[in-house]
Image (tube, coloured by chain):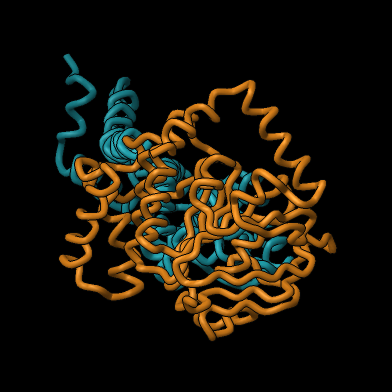
Chain colours: A cyan, B orange
Amino acid sequence: MQDLGISILFKGINFQRLLGGLWVTLRLALITIGLSCLFGLLFASLLLSRRKLPRIFCRIWLEIVRFMPQLVLLYIVYFGFARVFGLDLDGETSAVIVFTFWGTAEMGDLIRGALTSIPRHQTESAAALGLKKSQIFLHVLIPQTLRRLLPQAINLSTRIIKTTALVKMINVTEVLKVGQQIIGQFYRQPDAAFWVYFVIFLLYFIICWPFSLLARQLEKRWA
Amino acid sequence: MADTILRVENVYKSFDGQDVLRGVSLQIREGEVVVIVGPSGCGKSTLLRCINGLETISSGNIFLRDEKISGRTKDLHLVRQKIGMVFQSYDLFPHMKVMDNLLLGPTRALSRPRADVEKEALEMLERVGLKDKAYALPRTLSGGQKQRTALVRAMLMHPEILLLDEITAALDPEMVSEVLNVVIDLARGGMTMAIVTHEMRFAEAVADRVLFLEDGVVLEEGKPEEFFHTPKTERAQRFLQSFTYASKRGTSEKQSKNNLGD
């Protein structure tokens, strides 16, 4: 009688390999999210700029990101850049570029939305108290913006984490790729695929669930 | 004769080519309460907003004591520290407790020690009947309580003059008097104020002088007993008549009479 498919995960170092792949996923996501927050701030300030050109520039950027499948963007950067610009980027760098390109626009738009949703009167009554512009931002606008932003930013982050699964298409050995390697190794085990993918599902769940729980909690508390 | 605190000279203001203020002049002396009335859109709120620099004026001058405060872009916050303003929509900071709302200006803008301000804030909250709300969040307060808090917040800056912009317009009728009684209390305490309001009974009770504004100009100016009972201009007569008509239908007149009759 054959072993149950799940047992292959505990053969040799398979489970460590899977966790190693998960770390690649997580590292990629964390770098992307960090950069997206940073550049997102800049993006938001351009979206709110009084000048027209930066606003149009950001709008176009945002639309591209929304309409273009992330996989296409990955292919453009990973395969296209090498051909056209002679830029031979490795998979992970390409992935960081693409996901940050995407995350920056979406995060920037979220920040813009959160900031502009604060009534103008909040700024005015803070100004009427004789606070400086920087103090108004620090004590009145930023805390309120964060409250509105955080739940949405967390949702975006879980979307980024999930989407990193695509990078296996450009030869990054993240958790999904490792899983497929393991399945390939045990091709004689008919239910190997099911169990490996099931465990990968659990791993994604374990990463993303606390985030969305936190988002929901914050939403309730700050409603 | 008391010192002149505020001097507005021939102020014009236009939005998109539309003149809202067309040569408004007024002076307010120390301890004086000036009430500005007029039909909506006459420029009353704009006038107050121009005084503390929330709007920039097109021409004219505004002086606080002898310091010219109009037309400056630098250090406007220093001017605003001396001019308190309370708005129609209360505008407490929703993420801060009542006490933190009160402390923000004095501790951050004036760099006063926190403990001092907190002690003073508690005293003032007690005076307006809100001591038990000192550490509550604004969203747990009623409209009237919020507006009283906003008044305390403005007063804690010890402004030279307080501008009140239709502070009861968003309140349910039964909460109007609890707010206006605080204002009357401040007036008795000698606070200099410029008040825009639609509460005519209150205006009559609190004003030292009434300004009637229409189409961006001061049409009539006088003592409250003269203005409200024997208005000189036909426009002012018509304006005041519209209120008697309205108050015969509603209950607000009766209520304010009772509350302000003491």
| Nearer to the camera, A141 or A22 | A141
B226 horizontally vs B166: left or right: right
Residue at horizontal 41%, vertical 45%?
A: B147
Residue at horizontal 66%, vertical 43%?
A: B229
Which residue of the protein is positioned furthest toward the right in this rendering?
B17
Q: Position of residue A173 (x, y in %)?
A: 37, 50
B247 horizontally vs A182: left or right: right
Q: Position of residue A55 (x, y in %)?
A: 68, 62
Q: Image height check: is B170 above or below B93? A: above
A142 horizontally vs B63: left or right: left
| Nearer to the camera, B209 or A212 | B209
**Image mark count:** 0
Q: Position of residue B193 (x, y in %)?
A: 49, 61
Residue B173 visible (yes or no) = yes
Q: Image height check: is A56 above or below B66? A: above
| Nearer to the camera, B63 or A122 | B63
Which residue of the protein is positioned furthest toward the top in this rendering?
A1
Residue A78 visible (yes or no) = no
Location of the C terminus of chain B by quadrant is: top left
Residue at horizontal 43%, vertical 70%?
A: A130
Q: Position of residue A197 (x, y in %)?
A: 33, 30
Residue at horizontal 61%, vertical 73%?
A: A86
